[in-house]
Amino acid sequence: MITSRLALAAAEPEDTNPLIPHTPEIVISLIVFGLIFFLLKKLVIPAFEKAYAERTAAIEGGIEEAQAAQKEAKAALDKYNEQLAGARHEAAAIREEAKEQGAQIIAELRAQAQAEAERITSTAHAQVEAERAQVLAQLKGEVGSMATQLAGRIVGESLDDDARQKRTVERFIAELEESAN
Amino acid sequence: MTLALTAFAASAEPPSPGPKDFDLPAVFHFGEFGVTKPMLLVVLSLFVIVGLFSTMARPAAVVPGRMQFAGELVYGFVRNGIARENIGSAEFMRFVPYLFTIFLFVLVNNFYGLFPFLQFPSMSHIGYPLAIAILSWLVYNGAGIKKKGFLGYLKHETVPGGMKGPILLLLVPLEFLSNILLRPITLTLRLFATMFAGHLLLILFSLGGSYLLLHSDNSLALPAGLVSSLLAIAISFLEILIMFLQAYVFTLLSSMYIGEALADEH
Protein backbone atom coordinates (compact mmCIF):
# COMPACT_ATOMS: atom_id res chain seq x y z
CA MET A 1 0.00 0.00 0.00
CA ILE A 2 2.76 2.38 0.98
CA THR A 3 4.75 1.62 -2.13
CA SER A 4 1.75 2.23 -4.36
CA ARG A 5 1.05 5.55 -2.67
CA LEU A 6 4.68 6.50 -2.91
CA ALA A 7 4.68 5.81 -6.60
CA LEU A 8 1.57 7.97 -6.87
CA ALA A 9 2.85 10.69 -4.60
CA ALA A 10 6.30 11.39 -5.84
CA ALA A 11 7.08 12.02 -9.44
CA GLU A 12 10.76 12.16 -8.57
CA PRO A 13 11.87 9.62 -6.00
CA GLU A 14 11.65 11.28 -2.60
CA ASP A 15 12.45 10.08 0.86
CA THR A 16 9.49 9.75 3.20
CA ASN A 17 11.66 10.60 6.20
CA PRO A 18 10.14 13.94 7.23
CA LEU A 19 13.40 15.07 8.85
CA ILE A 20 15.26 15.24 5.55
CA PRO A 21 14.83 18.75 4.12
CA HIS A 22 14.27 19.19 0.38
CA THR A 23 16.59 21.71 -1.17
CA PRO A 24 13.89 23.33 -3.38
CA GLU A 25 11.80 24.00 -0.30
CA ILE A 26 14.68 25.75 1.44
CA VAL A 27 15.34 27.84 -1.65
CA ILE A 28 11.69 28.77 -2.12
CA SER A 29 11.39 29.60 1.55
CA LEU A 30 14.40 31.88 1.38
CA ILE A 31 13.19 33.64 -1.77
CA VAL A 32 9.65 34.18 -0.49
CA PHE A 33 10.92 35.24 2.91
CA GLY A 34 13.30 37.69 1.28
CA LEU A 35 10.55 39.16 -0.90
CA ILE A 36 8.18 39.52 2.07
CA PHE A 37 10.96 41.12 4.09
CA PHE A 38 11.79 43.57 1.32
CA LEU A 39 8.17 44.53 0.62
CA LEU A 40 7.23 44.87 4.28
CA LYS A 41 10.29 47.00 4.89
CA LYS A 42 9.56 49.24 1.93
CA LEU A 43 5.75 49.46 2.03
CA VAL A 44 4.36 48.52 5.40
CA ILE A 45 6.76 49.40 8.18
CA PRO A 46 7.45 53.02 7.09
CA ALA A 47 3.72 53.64 6.94
CA PHE A 48 3.15 52.25 10.43
CA GLU A 49 6.13 54.16 11.79
CA LYS A 50 4.91 57.35 10.15
CA ALA A 51 1.51 56.90 11.77
CA TYR A 52 3.21 56.27 15.12
CA ALA A 53 5.41 59.33 14.80
CA GLU A 54 2.54 61.57 13.75
CA ARG A 55 0.39 60.25 16.56
CA THR A 56 3.14 60.89 19.06
CA ALA A 57 3.64 64.38 17.69
CA ALA A 58 -0.10 65.04 17.81
CA ILE A 59 -0.39 63.84 21.38
CA GLU A 60 2.68 65.77 22.48
CA GLY A 61 1.43 68.85 20.63
CA GLY A 62 -1.91 68.49 22.36
CA ILE A 63 -0.25 68.21 25.72
CA GLU A 64 1.94 71.23 25.05
CA GLU A 65 -1.07 73.21 23.89
CA ALA A 66 -2.97 72.26 27.01
CA GLN A 67 -0.02 73.22 29.17
CA ALA A 68 0.24 76.59 27.42
CA ALA A 69 -3.48 77.18 27.87
CA GLN A 70 -3.21 76.27 31.52
CA LYS A 71 -0.29 78.64 31.96
CA GLU A 72 -2.22 81.41 30.25
CA ALA A 73 -5.25 80.80 32.42
CA LYS A 74 -3.09 80.86 35.52
CA ALA A 75 -1.50 84.14 34.45
CA ALA A 76 -4.93 85.65 33.85
CA LEU A 77 -6.10 84.42 37.24
CA ASP A 78 -3.05 85.91 38.92
CA LYS A 79 -3.61 89.17 37.13
CA TYR A 80 -7.25 89.30 38.18
CA ASN A 81 -6.40 88.40 41.74
CA GLU A 82 -3.82 91.15 41.78
CA GLN A 83 -6.29 93.64 40.35
CA LEU A 84 -8.89 92.53 42.85
CA ALA A 85 -6.46 93.01 45.73
CA GLY A 86 -5.56 96.45 44.36
CA ALA A 87 -9.21 97.38 44.09
CA ARG A 88 -9.88 96.19 47.62
CA HIS A 89 -6.96 98.17 48.90
CA GLU A 90 -8.11 101.26 47.06
CA ALA A 91 -11.64 100.81 48.33
CA ALA A 92 -10.35 100.55 51.87
CA ALA A 93 -8.26 103.70 51.43
CA ILE A 94 -11.24 105.54 49.98
CA ARG A 95 -13.44 104.39 52.80
CA GLU A 96 -10.85 105.51 55.32
CA GLU A 97 -10.53 108.88 53.67
CA ALA A 98 -14.28 109.26 53.51
CA LYS A 99 -14.53 108.45 57.17
CA GLU A 100 -11.91 111.04 57.96
CA GLN A 101 -13.54 113.60 55.77
CA GLY A 102 -16.92 112.84 57.31
CA ALA A 103 -15.54 113.27 60.79
CA GLN A 104 -13.89 116.51 59.76
CA ILE A 105 -17.09 117.79 58.21
CA ILE A 106 -19.04 116.86 61.28
CA ALA A 107 -16.53 118.60 63.50
CA GLU A 108 -16.61 121.72 61.32
CA LEU A 109 -20.36 121.73 61.26
CA ARG A 110 -20.49 121.27 64.97
CA ALA A 111 -18.11 124.15 65.49
CA GLN A 112 -20.13 126.30 63.11
CA ALA A 113 -23.35 125.40 64.85
CA GLN A 114 -21.85 126.11 68.20
CA ALA A 115 -20.58 129.46 67.04
CA GLU A 116 -23.93 130.25 65.53
CA ALA A 117 -25.67 129.18 68.67
CA GLU A 118 -23.34 131.31 70.75
CA ARG A 119 -23.86 134.22 68.45
CA ILE A 120 -27.63 133.83 68.60
CA THR A 121 -27.53 133.46 72.34
CA SER A 122 -25.36 136.52 72.83
CA THR A 123 -27.55 138.55 70.43
CA ALA A 124 -30.58 137.43 72.34
CA HIS A 125 -28.91 138.32 75.61
CA ALA A 126 -27.98 141.73 74.35
CA GLN A 127 -31.46 142.29 73.00
CA VAL A 128 -33.03 141.14 76.20
CA GLU A 129 -30.65 143.35 78.17
CA ALA A 130 -31.42 146.33 75.97
CA GLU A 131 -35.13 145.73 76.22
CA ARG A 132 -34.87 145.33 79.92
CA ALA A 133 -32.89 148.54 80.22
CA GLN A 134 -35.43 150.30 78.00
CA VAL A 135 -38.33 148.92 79.95
CA LEU A 136 -36.58 149.76 83.17
CA ALA A 137 -35.92 153.33 82.03
CA GLN A 138 -39.49 153.67 80.85
CA LEU A 139 -40.73 152.17 84.06
CA LYS A 140 -38.51 154.50 86.05
CA GLY A 141 -40.15 157.54 84.50
CA GLU A 142 -43.61 156.09 84.59
CA VAL A 143 -43.34 154.68 88.08
CA GLY A 144 -42.26 158.18 89.33
CA SER A 145 -45.15 159.96 87.73
CA MET A 146 -47.64 157.22 88.55
CA ALA A 147 -46.48 157.14 92.13
CA THR A 148 -46.64 160.91 92.27
CA GLN A 149 -50.05 160.87 90.73
CA LEU A 150 -51.14 158.17 93.06
CA ALA A 151 -49.65 159.87 96.10
CA GLY A 152 -51.15 163.20 95.01
CA ARG A 153 -54.49 161.58 94.66
CA ILE A 154 -54.16 159.88 97.96
CA VAL A 155 -52.90 162.97 99.73
CA GLY A 156 -55.35 165.06 97.82
CA GLU A 157 -53.13 167.92 97.20
CA SER A 158 -50.40 168.69 94.81
CA LEU A 159 -46.96 168.74 96.15
CA ASP A 160 -45.62 172.04 94.92
CA ASP A 161 -42.06 171.80 95.67
CA ASP A 162 -40.89 170.04 92.48
CA ALA A 163 -37.31 169.87 93.62
CA ARG A 164 -38.10 168.16 96.85
CA GLN A 165 -40.54 165.96 95.10
CA LYS A 166 -37.98 164.91 92.57
CA ARG A 167 -35.33 164.14 95.18
CA THR A 168 -37.78 162.11 97.18
CA VAL A 169 -38.72 160.07 94.12
CA GLU A 170 -35.12 159.56 93.10
CA ARG A 171 -34.19 158.41 96.56
CA PHE A 172 -37.09 156.08 96.52
CA ILE A 173 -36.03 154.60 93.22
CA ALA A 174 -32.46 154.31 94.29
CA GLU A 175 -33.64 152.44 97.30
CA LEU A 176 -35.72 150.24 95.01
CA GLU A 177 -32.71 149.49 92.81
CA GLU A 178 -30.63 148.78 95.79
CA SER A 179 -33.12 146.39 97.16
CA ALA A 180 -33.46 144.78 93.73
CA ASN A 181 -29.77 144.28 93.55
CA MET B 1 -5.20 15.76 4.25
CA THR B 2 -5.77 15.89 0.56
CA LEU B 3 -8.50 14.94 -1.84
CA ALA B 4 -6.50 11.88 -2.78
CA LEU B 5 -6.46 10.83 0.85
CA THR B 6 -10.16 11.42 1.27
CA ALA B 7 -10.83 9.17 -1.68
CA PHE B 8 -8.53 6.67 -0.10
CA ALA B 9 -10.39 6.88 3.20
CA ALA B 10 -13.66 6.17 1.48
CA SER B 11 -12.47 2.66 0.68
CA ALA B 12 -13.06 -0.09 3.18
CA GLU B 13 -9.42 -0.24 4.31
CA PRO B 14 -8.82 1.33 7.77
CA PRO B 15 -6.71 4.50 7.38
CA SER B 16 -3.14 4.46 8.71
CA PRO B 17 -1.90 8.06 8.81
CA GLY B 18 1.86 8.58 8.90
CA PRO B 19 4.71 10.62 7.47
CA LYS B 20 3.74 9.45 4.00
CA ASP B 21 0.65 11.66 4.21
CA PHE B 22 2.92 14.69 4.13
CA ASP B 23 4.47 13.66 0.84
CA LEU B 24 1.92 15.11 -1.48
CA PRO B 25 2.04 14.55 -5.20
CA ALA B 26 3.23 17.43 -7.31
CA VAL B 27 0.38 19.69 -8.34
CA PHE B 28 1.99 20.28 -11.72
CA HIS B 29 5.38 19.89 -13.30
CA PHE B 30 7.62 22.65 -14.40
CA GLY B 31 9.90 20.76 -16.77
CA GLU B 32 11.56 18.19 -14.54
CA PHE B 33 10.65 20.12 -11.39
CA GLY B 34 7.53 19.04 -9.55
CA VAL B 35 5.66 21.92 -7.92
CA THR B 36 4.01 20.75 -4.71
CA LYS B 37 1.17 22.12 -2.62
CA PRO B 38 3.35 23.57 0.18
CA MET B 39 5.45 25.38 -2.41
CA LEU B 40 2.35 27.03 -3.81
CA LEU B 41 1.14 27.82 -0.30
CA VAL B 42 4.43 29.46 0.63
CA VAL B 43 4.33 31.59 -2.52
CA LEU B 44 0.70 32.42 -1.78
CA SER B 45 1.74 33.65 1.68
CA LEU B 46 3.80 36.34 -0.05
CA PHE B 47 0.64 37.78 -1.64
CA VAL B 48 -1.48 37.29 1.47
CA ILE B 49 0.96 39.01 3.81
CA VAL B 50 2.09 41.83 1.57
CA GLY B 51 -1.39 42.44 0.13
CA LEU B 52 -3.08 42.46 3.53
CA PHE B 53 -0.54 44.55 5.35
CA SER B 54 0.13 47.11 2.66
CA THR B 55 -3.64 47.68 2.53
CA MET B 56 -3.78 48.04 6.30
CA ALA B 57 -0.74 50.30 6.52
CA ARG B 58 -1.43 52.55 3.54
CA PRO B 59 -3.71 55.13 5.24
CA ALA B 60 -0.96 55.81 7.81
CA ALA B 61 -3.54 57.95 9.59
CA VAL B 62 -3.10 59.52 13.00
CA VAL B 63 -6.57 58.28 13.92
CA PRO B 64 -6.56 54.74 12.51
CA GLY B 65 -9.48 53.04 10.81
CA ARG B 66 -10.51 49.50 11.62
CA MET B 67 -8.06 47.92 9.17
CA GLN B 68 -5.13 50.08 10.16
CA PHE B 69 -5.88 49.47 13.81
CA ALA B 70 -5.77 45.70 13.28
CA GLY B 71 -2.48 45.99 11.38
CA GLU B 72 -0.98 48.20 14.05
CA LEU B 73 -2.04 45.71 16.70
CA VAL B 74 0.02 42.97 15.01
CA TYR B 75 2.90 45.28 14.17
CA GLY B 76 2.96 46.77 17.65
CA PHE B 77 2.89 43.29 19.16
CA VAL B 78 6.05 42.32 17.29
CA ARG B 79 7.71 45.74 17.51
CA ASN B 80 7.08 46.58 21.16
CA GLY B 81 6.08 43.27 22.70
CA ILE B 82 8.85 41.16 21.20
CA ALA B 83 11.63 43.23 19.61
CA ARG B 84 11.91 46.13 22.06
CA GLU B 85 11.45 43.89 25.09
CA ASN B 86 14.30 41.57 24.13
CA ILE B 87 16.74 43.72 22.18
CA GLY B 88 16.46 46.99 24.07
CA SER B 89 15.20 50.33 22.88
CA ALA B 90 18.61 51.45 21.57
CA GLU B 91 19.05 48.94 18.76
CA PHE B 92 15.76 47.12 18.25
CA MET B 93 14.47 49.15 15.29
CA ARG B 94 17.09 47.61 12.96
CA PHE B 95 15.66 44.15 13.58
CA VAL B 96 11.96 44.96 13.56
CA PRO B 97 11.46 44.33 9.81
CA TYR B 98 13.20 40.98 10.08
CA LEU B 99 11.23 39.87 13.15
CA PHE B 100 7.96 41.17 11.73
CA THR B 101 8.58 39.12 8.57
CA ILE B 102 9.32 35.99 10.59
CA PHE B 103 6.17 36.37 12.62
CA LEU B 104 3.86 36.88 9.66
CA PHE B 105 5.56 34.29 7.47
CA VAL B 106 5.36 31.58 10.12
CA LEU B 107 1.88 32.59 11.28
CA VAL B 108 0.31 32.55 7.82
CA ASN B 109 2.02 29.34 6.80
CA ASN B 110 0.89 27.70 10.04
CA PHE B 111 -2.69 28.86 9.71
CA TYR B 112 -2.91 27.21 6.31
CA GLY B 113 -3.30 24.00 8.29
CA LEU B 114 -6.82 24.94 9.37
CA PHE B 115 -7.86 27.08 6.43
CA PRO B 116 -10.60 25.33 4.45
CA PHE B 117 -9.41 23.88 1.10
CA LEU B 118 -5.78 24.79 1.79
CA GLN B 119 -5.54 22.64 4.92
CA PHE B 120 -1.83 22.04 4.97
CA PRO B 121 0.64 23.79 7.27
CA SER B 122 3.64 24.50 5.05
CA MET B 123 5.86 24.54 8.12
CA SER B 124 5.29 20.79 8.55
CA HIS B 125 7.83 20.36 5.74
CA ILE B 126 11.15 20.79 7.48
CA GLY B 127 12.78 22.73 4.64
CA TYR B 128 10.68 25.87 5.28
CA PRO B 129 11.37 26.32 9.01
CA LEU B 130 14.99 25.32 8.40
CA ALA B 131 15.45 28.22 5.98
CA ILE B 132 14.19 30.78 8.53
CA ALA B 133 16.20 29.19 11.32
CA ILE B 134 19.38 29.50 9.22
CA LEU B 135 18.50 33.13 8.55
CA SER B 136 17.99 33.79 12.26
CA TRP B 137 21.30 32.08 13.01
CA LEU B 138 23.06 34.32 10.47
CA VAL B 139 21.32 37.42 11.79
CA TYR B 140 22.06 37.01 15.47
CA ASN B 141 25.61 35.80 14.99
CA GLY B 142 26.23 38.51 12.40
CA ALA B 143 24.87 41.21 14.72
CA GLY B 144 27.06 39.97 17.56
CA ILE B 145 30.23 39.72 15.43
CA LYS B 146 29.60 43.16 13.97
CA LYS B 147 29.34 44.67 17.41
CA LYS B 148 32.05 42.81 19.35
CA GLY B 149 34.38 41.42 16.68
CA PHE B 150 34.72 37.70 15.93
CA LEU B 151 36.75 36.69 18.98
CA GLY B 152 35.01 39.11 21.28
CA TYR B 153 31.67 37.72 20.21
CA LEU B 154 32.83 34.11 20.64
CA LYS B 155 34.03 34.93 24.14
CA HIS B 156 30.76 36.76 24.86
CA GLU B 157 28.67 33.76 23.84
CA THR B 158 30.79 30.96 25.30
CA VAL B 159 32.34 32.27 28.51
CA PRO B 160 29.73 32.81 31.20
CA GLY B 161 30.29 35.93 33.27
CA GLY B 162 32.09 35.52 36.59
CA MET B 163 33.46 32.04 35.76
CA LYS B 164 37.18 31.36 36.17
CA GLY B 165 39.56 28.41 36.26
CA PRO B 166 39.26 24.85 35.02
CA ILE B 167 35.46 24.83 35.06
CA LEU B 168 35.73 26.81 31.86
CA LEU B 169 37.09 23.71 30.12
CA LEU B 170 33.72 22.16 30.67
CA LEU B 171 31.55 25.21 30.25
CA VAL B 172 32.98 26.72 27.09
CA PRO B 173 32.27 23.74 24.81
CA LEU B 174 28.82 23.36 26.36
CA GLU B 175 27.98 27.02 25.84
CA PHE B 176 29.35 26.89 22.31
CA LEU B 177 27.18 23.88 21.59
CA SER B 178 24.01 25.34 23.03
CA ASN B 179 24.44 28.98 21.96
CA ILE B 180 26.00 28.57 18.53
CA LEU B 181 25.52 25.08 17.14
CA LEU B 182 22.19 23.83 18.42
CA ARG B 183 20.03 26.95 18.20
CA PRO B 184 19.16 26.73 14.50
CA ILE B 185 18.38 23.03 14.92
CA THR B 186 16.12 23.53 17.92
CA LEU B 187 14.39 26.43 16.21
CA THR B 188 13.74 24.26 13.16
CA LEU B 189 12.66 21.14 15.01
CA ARG B 190 10.35 22.94 17.41
CA LEU B 191 8.34 24.56 14.66
CA PHE B 192 8.47 21.66 12.26
CA ALA B 193 7.58 19.02 14.83
CA THR B 194 4.62 20.84 16.37
CA MET B 195 3.13 21.53 12.94
CA PHE B 196 3.83 18.00 11.77
CA ALA B 197 2.39 16.38 14.87
CA GLY B 198 -0.63 18.66 14.97
CA HIS B 199 -1.50 17.94 11.39
CA LEU B 200 -0.96 14.23 11.91
CA LEU B 201 -3.34 14.30 14.87
CA LEU B 202 -5.96 16.04 12.79
CA ILE B 203 -5.58 13.50 9.99
CA LEU B 204 -5.77 10.66 12.48
CA PHE B 205 -8.94 11.80 14.20
CA SER B 206 -10.78 13.05 11.14
CA LEU B 207 -9.98 10.05 8.94
CA GLY B 208 -10.44 7.67 11.83
CA GLY B 209 -13.77 9.26 12.73
CA SER B 210 -15.11 9.07 9.19
CA TYR B 211 -13.91 5.48 8.78
CA LEU B 212 -15.48 4.38 12.07
CA LEU B 213 -18.76 6.12 11.36
CA LEU B 214 -19.11 5.07 7.72
CA HIS B 215 -17.23 1.87 7.03
CA SER B 216 -16.78 -0.17 10.17
CA ASP B 217 -19.06 -3.06 11.15
CA ASN B 218 -17.86 -3.16 14.73
CA SER B 219 -20.62 -2.47 17.28
CA LEU B 220 -18.43 0.02 19.16
CA ALA B 221 -17.60 1.89 15.98
CA LEU B 222 -20.41 4.44 16.29
CA PRO B 223 -19.51 5.87 19.74
CA ALA B 224 -15.80 5.64 18.95
CA GLY B 225 -16.37 7.44 15.66
CA LEU B 226 -18.34 10.19 17.39
CA VAL B 227 -15.64 10.68 19.99
CA SER B 228 -13.00 10.71 17.29
CA SER B 229 -14.87 13.33 15.27
CA LEU B 230 -15.43 15.52 18.33
CA LEU B 231 -11.74 15.22 19.16
CA ALA B 232 -10.87 16.31 15.64
CA ILE B 233 -12.87 19.50 16.23
CA ALA B 234 -11.37 20.05 19.67
CA ILE B 235 -7.85 19.52 18.33
CA SER B 236 -8.58 22.03 15.56
CA PHE B 237 -9.18 24.68 18.22
CA LEU B 238 -6.06 23.63 20.08
CA GLU B 239 -4.15 23.88 16.81
CA ILE B 240 -5.27 27.48 16.33
CA LEU B 241 -3.59 28.30 19.61
CA ILE B 242 -0.48 26.25 18.83
CA MET B 243 -0.10 27.78 15.37
CA PHE B 244 -0.11 31.27 16.84
CA LEU B 245 2.10 30.22 19.72
CA GLN B 246 4.74 28.69 17.45
CA ALA B 247 4.92 31.83 15.33
CA TYR B 248 5.26 33.84 18.53
CA VAL B 249 7.91 31.51 19.99
CA PHE B 250 10.00 31.49 16.81
CA THR B 251 9.96 35.29 16.67
CA LEU B 252 10.54 35.59 20.42
CA LEU B 253 13.54 33.26 20.40
CA SER B 254 15.07 34.96 17.37
CA SER B 255 14.77 38.32 19.12
CA MET B 256 16.16 36.89 22.36
CA TYR B 257 19.18 35.47 20.51
CA ILE B 258 19.76 38.86 18.89
CA GLY B 259 19.35 40.63 22.22
CA GLU B 260 21.76 38.27 23.89
CA ALA B 261 24.32 38.65 21.13
CA LEU B 262 24.18 42.43 21.49
CA ALA B 263 24.04 42.54 25.29
CA ASP B 264 26.92 44.17 27.14
CA GLU B 265 26.92 41.77 30.07
CA HIS B 266 26.42 38.08 29.83
Image: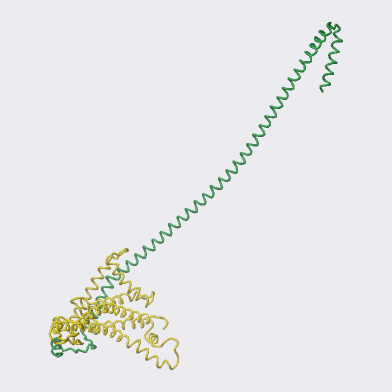
Chain colours: A green, B yellow
Location of the C terminus of chain B (image quadrant): bottom left
Q: Nearer the viewer, residue B192 or A32?
A: B192
Left or right of B181 in this view: A143: right
Q: Kindly tell me whether residue B55 is visible in this rendering.
A: yes
Residue drawn at x 19%, y 89% as measured from the top left: A16
User: Which residue does the image show at 15% across and 80% down from the upper left?
Assistant: B3
Q: Picture coordinates of residue B113 (x, y %)?
A: 22, 79
Q: Residue B177 sits in which quadrant?
A: bottom left
Q: In the rendered image of this protein, does residue A152 appear above or below residue B58?
A: above
| Vertical relation: B175 (above or below) A120 | below
Residue A7 at x, y = what percent? 13, 88
Residue lying at 67% horizontally and 34% vertically, measured from the top left: A111
Q: Tell me residue B203's x, y (percent).
A: 20, 83
Q: Is residue B253 toward the left or the right of residue A5 in the image?
A: right
Say which of B190 and A25 sits in front: B190
**Image coords of residue B200 (percent x, y):** 22, 84
Q: Is residue A151 above or below residue B112?
A: above
The answer to whether any part of residue A26 appears in the image is: no
Q: Quadrant of residue A169?
A: top right
Total number of numbered discs in the rendering: 0
In front of the other: B126 or B202: B202
In the rendered structure, the answer to whether residue B125 lies left or right of residue B93 reads left
* Quadrant location of the N terminus of chain B in the rendered image: bottom left
